[in-house]
Image (cartoon, rainbow, N blue to C red):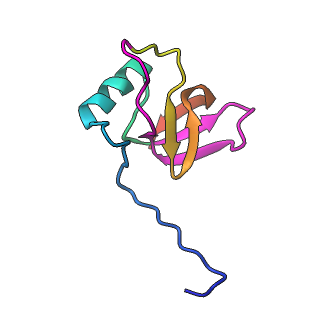
Amino acid sequence: MSADQFALAFDPSPVLQPGVVPHLRDEIARVWGLPLGERVEITFRPAFSVPAIGGLLELRASPARYPWDPHEPLALRIAGCDFTSRDIERWTLL
């Protein structure tokens, strides 16, 4: 690879925060009503810098307190793009 090129490492496998296990992710997905760990297209609210993105919806960090409050923002990621649950206008499974 030359000096003016760079590699993009797009890994199709989910990357969970250390300590976030799949059953915990699934419970968080149920509470927030989001398809965590699934391939989706997200359309963002107009104030967000990107109109839409598609890919694997990942949990960036588990909620801070239990019992969980689905009105609190949830830290999410798709293909290296970080956002919160409050940034989502709608989502569609791919």
| Residue that sits furthest to the right in the current view | 47
Q: Position of residue 50 (x, y in %)?
A: 69, 44
Q: Position of residue 53 (x, y in %)?
A: 58, 46
The relative height of residue 5 versus residue 60 in the rendered view (above or below) is: below
Which quarter of the picture shows residue 32?
top left
Which quarter of the picture shows residue 26?
top left
Q: Which residues are magenta?
A: 40-67
Q: Position of residue 14 (x, y in %)?
A: 36, 49
Q: Position of residue 65 (x, y in %)?
A: 41, 18
**Which corner quadrant holds the N terminus?**
bottom right
Q: Is residue 22 left or right of residue 78?
A: left
Question: Residue at (53%, 18%) from the top-left corner?
Answer: 72
| Residue that sits furthest to the bottom in the current view | 2
The relative height of residue 32 versus residue 6 in the rendered view (above or below) is: above
Q: Is residue 75 left or right of residue 26?
A: right
| Residue that sits furthest to the left in the current view | 23
Frontmost residue, 51 versus 67:
67
The relative height of residue 64 versus residue 18 in the rendered view (above or below) is: above
**Which corner quadrant holds the C terminus?**
top left
Question: Residue at (47%, 16%) from the top-left corner?
Answer: 70
The relative height of residue 65 versus residue 91 in the rendered view (above or below) is: above
The answer to whether residue 46 is magenta is yes
- In this rendering, the count of numbered labels is 0
Question: Residue at (30%, 38%) from the top-left corner?
Answer: 19
The answer to whether residue 62 is magenta is yes
Question: Residue at (61%, 36%) from the top-left corner?
Answer: 43
Frontmost residue, 82 versus 32:
82
